[in-house]
Structure formats: C-alpha cells, structure tokens
Image: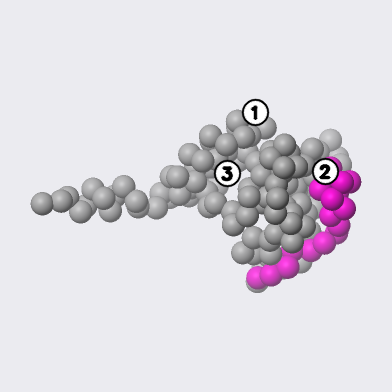
C-alpha cells in the first residue's frame, strides 16, 4: 500500500510570501545567479518565467542573457511584461543598460496585456519595487 497523503503533501503548493522573490533577487545581486531562485521555484514560492531571457533578466544574469538565442525583444510573460520590465523590477542595472543601449529596448514601452497590469512601464516596475538606481535617483 502506498501512502498517497505523503505524495500529495510533497507536491502541495507552499504559501507565497512577498519576501520570497526579494530574497532571491538579493541572492542574485550577491552572485548567486540561480541556486536561490531555483529553490524558490522548486518550492513553488516563485513561478518560473516562460522564456529563458525573462528569467535571466529577472535574475540579473547579463552573461546568460547575452548568450541567449531567443529573440529577446519579443519575449513577454503571461501578463505582457518584457525583459526590461523584469530587469527594472529586480534592480538589475547592468541588464537594464544592456537592454536599452545595446538591444534598443524602449523604456517607455508599456506592459501589454491583462487587466491592472496593462500600461505599466519598466519605470513603474522599478519604482514599485523601490529600485532607485534604476529610476536614476541613486
């Protein structure tokens, strides 16, 4: 007989804490470009993004983003956010500069998509997350 309850518990979604993503982002800023995010993803505290380029932008992994073979400019998440939105939201200044200066992302491009998210710019994402460096105030 198999204990179904233990399997069910093993894959049960953990309660999300708003600080989970912030802890993962801080770890990425300190050089951990994957382990802390993967831990949060595996524990289902943070959702995996649908494209590698979005994930690299969120993590601030500029080296991986430079090597990415996806069309970085066309990748959007399910809510219409681009790589630039994710980089601004996670305070990844080097990625923000790369996306704007080298890949010519438009920083005034609003988020396309659903409900309350529509119209938010990358600057909105940076300001909402308190990322003053990206806002140009630090």
Q: SS class of the residue under badge 2?
A: helix
Percent across and percent down for residue 85 are 73, 53
Q: Earlier in the sequence, mark 3 or mark 1?
A: 3
Please, which residue is most extreme toward the front here?
69
Residue tagged by mark 2? 98
Main SS class of the magenta portion in the image: loop
The correct choice, above or below, for 82 with respect to 42 in the image is below
Q: SS class of the residue under badge 3?
A: helix
Please, which residue is most extreme toward the left here?
1
Labelled pair 2, 1 in contact (Cβ < 8 Å): no
Residue tagged by mark 1? 31
Percent across and percent down for residue 44 are 45, 49
Labelled pair 2, 3 in contact (Cβ < 8 Å): no
State the residue at coordinates (63%, 55%): 51
Q: Find the distance from the CA under tag 2 to the CA under tag 1.
A: 18 Å
Q: Find the distance from the CA under tag 3 to the CA under tag 1.
A: 16 Å
Which circle marks residue 22 in the picture? none
Judge depth for marks 2 and 3 and give the one in front: 2
Q: Earlier in the sequence, mark 2 or mark 1?
A: 1
Which circle marks residue 21 in the picture? 3
State the residue at coordinates (67%, 32%): 29
């Amino acid at each position: 007989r198999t204990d179904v309850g233990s399997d069910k518990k093993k894959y049960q979604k953990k309660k999300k804490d708003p600080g989970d993503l912030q802890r993962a982002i801080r770890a990425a800023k300190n050089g951990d470009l994957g382990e802390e995010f993967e831990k949060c993803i595996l524990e289902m505290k943070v959702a995996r993004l649908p494209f590698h380029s979005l994930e690299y932008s969120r993590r601030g992994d500029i080296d991986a983003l430079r090597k990415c073979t996806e069309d970085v400019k066309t990748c959007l998440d399910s809510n219409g956010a681009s790589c630039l939105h994710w980089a601004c939201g996670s305070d990844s200044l080097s990625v923000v500069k790369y996306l704007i200066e080298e890949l010519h992302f438009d920083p005034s491009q609003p988020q396309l998509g659903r409900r309350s998210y529509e119209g938010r710019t990358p600057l909105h994402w940076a300001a909402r997350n308190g990322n003053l460096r990206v806002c140009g105030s630090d």
